[in-house]
Amino acid sequence: MVNFVCPLDRLPLDKDLKCPRNHQFKFDDGVYDFLGYEPKNNDVLEKVAPLYEGVWAPLGFLITGRSSYSKMLKDAAHYANAREFLDVGTGPGKIFDYVDCRECYGLDISRKFLKILKAKRPNVISVRGDAKALPFPDESFSGVSSIFVIHMLDEPSKALSEISRVLRRGGKCSIGVLTSRGSVANLLSKWWKLELKAESFYIGSLENLNLRIYGSSHMGPWTIFKCQKQ
Ligand SMILES: [Zn+2]
């Protein structure tokens, strides 16, 4: 069992999810909740939540990446597959269909998506939290994935730094991002109101965080990096 830590100061939590500095978290309706606040909801994603893994993501990926969503996900999962596995920004947790994990953790900020995750994949521990402050100790996981989430954050390198921190040395991660390459990226960035980074930004960030890139695949403006922690 991976123990949780306080995402604010990384101190260990007691059995009631309270840290020595009195930061209190809760286990609510089957979800470990470390967020402590209500984020600005991404209205579009919240609305499509029930259709996300079956229709929205596969169709969107087919149009923008001209590739199969499930094939991409399977490939990313197989690379990082591990006994202790974390998916950051998991949504409904589709990637867990392709991971053979014993300790499976799915983290997201959306209650709605975590509710779907719990109903569909009860073996996955549902964690509500911020990708930029993960509630896990250093070197907790041998495999981490984060597919098409990090480019939506205001500080993507902070989330990458957290992924590197919770990965064990030799552990692998699959990181999928939307980069600024091409006209489809331009359209998507306007639609989502995002400031997209170039692929070189991610390459530099990953290498700086001791996540050596062993491969990358490109599907339209989408890139999956396959990395191993040095
Ligand atoms: Zn604390």
Image (spheres, helix red, strand yellow):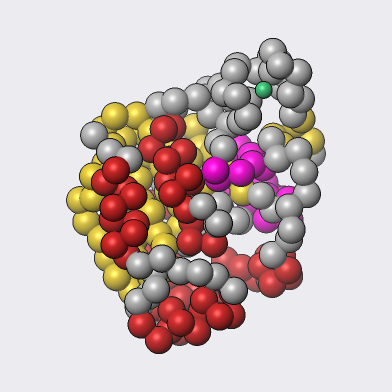
To which quarter of the image does residue 215 belong? bottom left
Residue 206 falls left or right of residue 42: left
Vertical relation: 13 (above or below) 65: above
What percent of the width, then of the height, locates residue 153?
A: 55, 57
What percent of the width, then of the height, locates residue 41?
A: 73, 60
For the point 77% across and 43% down, which residue is it? 37
Residue 131 in the magenta stretch? The answer is yes
Q: Is residue 43 visible?
A: yes
Query: What count of labels does the image hold?
Result: 0
Residue 197 falls left or right of residue 39: left
Of residue 18 and residue 95, the one placed in the foreground of this image is 18
What percent of the width, then of the height, locates residue 89?
A: 55, 52
What percent of the width, then of the height, locates residue 129?
A: 64, 41
Residue 118 in the magenta stretch? The answer is yes
Vertical relation: 49 (above or below) 172: below
For the point 57% across and 23% down, which residue is it? 10
Residue 186 falls left or right of residue 42: left
- Residue segment shown in magenta: 111-132
Of residue 93 and residue 12, the one placed in the foreground of this image is 12
Of residue 160 and residue 227, the one placed in the foreground of this image is 160
For the point 38% across and 38% down, which residue is it? 164
Residue 172 falls left or right of residue 150: left
Q: Is residue 141 visible?
A: no
The image quadrant where one finds the C terminus is top left
To which quarter of the image does residue 32 belong? top right
For the point 40% across and 86% down, which residue is it? 183
In the image, ligand 1 is in what quadrant? Answer: top right
